[in-house]
Image (cartoon, rainbow, N blue to C red):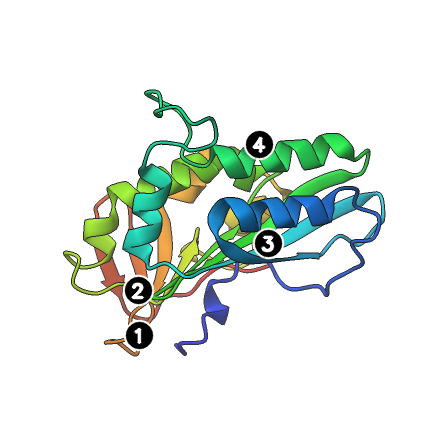
Amino acid sequence: MSKSGNEFFNNPKIGTQSTDHIVGLEAFRKGLEKHFFAEVSIGNYGLKEESANLIIDIKCNLSLDEALFYINKPSTCSGRPKKSGEEKTILFLLAYSKLKKLNSTSIDISELTISLTDTTILISKIYDQSIADQLENIFTELINHNVYYTKGLNETPFEVFIPVFEEDSLESDVKLKNIVSDNNNTNDYFGFWGMYYDQSEEAAIYDLNTKTIIFGDIQILSE
């Protein structure tokens, strides 16, 4: 299996479309850059002007450890200490909610890529509004499992794909049908993540349930 990462994409690229019809998109982009001290680019995979499937790429000059610390520290959005249970991803979610309210167009996030100095995290849509719905939980699990998928903090994967699916059978497999029909569920984000490490030519799967890394010939479902 190559180190390009292509095996881990759950959704195929269908070509970017115009974003001119999306009201407030530039303000949304600039807001993300300000909040996260990042460079942000946004594309659209939507095939029709009455819808938009955004591809958001956030490039931060932070390491994975620094980024996880940053989002887990007290929120600066209100100038007050973070309350118990307050969302780590609140700034992103508030900005996205405002963007959706500005548009009569149906807006969703197809992919969210976070490019850091030592790793790239790619989060794929698996059901309607799944990324916004599960972003807080995904970052909570990135923090909770950090010591395991970094091999005791000794090796950070240079690419992380969330989620990936094991191929149980051929194209009749129920998980493949769910990807195509937007019928996956919350738990599908927290079964397996794809990993690439510098010290290995093989791709790896991180099993969140057993907190173990599996190497070998792993096939991933794709549309």
Lower sequence index among marks 1 and 4: 4
Query: How dense is the environment of label 4, judged by Cα within 10 Å: few (below 14), some, or many (20 and up)?
Result: few
Name which residue lies at 62% across and 42% down.
182
Name which residue lies at 51% across and 59% down.
170
Comparing labels 4 and 3, the label whose residue is closer to the camera: 4
In depth, the one of 212 and 197 nearer the eye is 197
Query: How dense is the environment of label 2, judged by Cα within 10 Å: few (below 14), some, or many (20 and up)?
Result: many
Q: Amino acid at mark 2?
A: Pro
Residue beneath disc 2? 157
Secondary structure beneath label 2: loop
Lower sequence index among marks 3 and 1: 3
The reply to whether discs 2 and 1 touch (Cβ–Cβ < 8 Å) is: no
In depth, the one of 189 and 58 nearer the eye is 58
For this view, does 195 lie left or right of residue 18?
left
> How far is disc 4 from disc 2 in space, using C-alphas?
30 Å
For this view, does 149 lie left or right of residue 26?
left
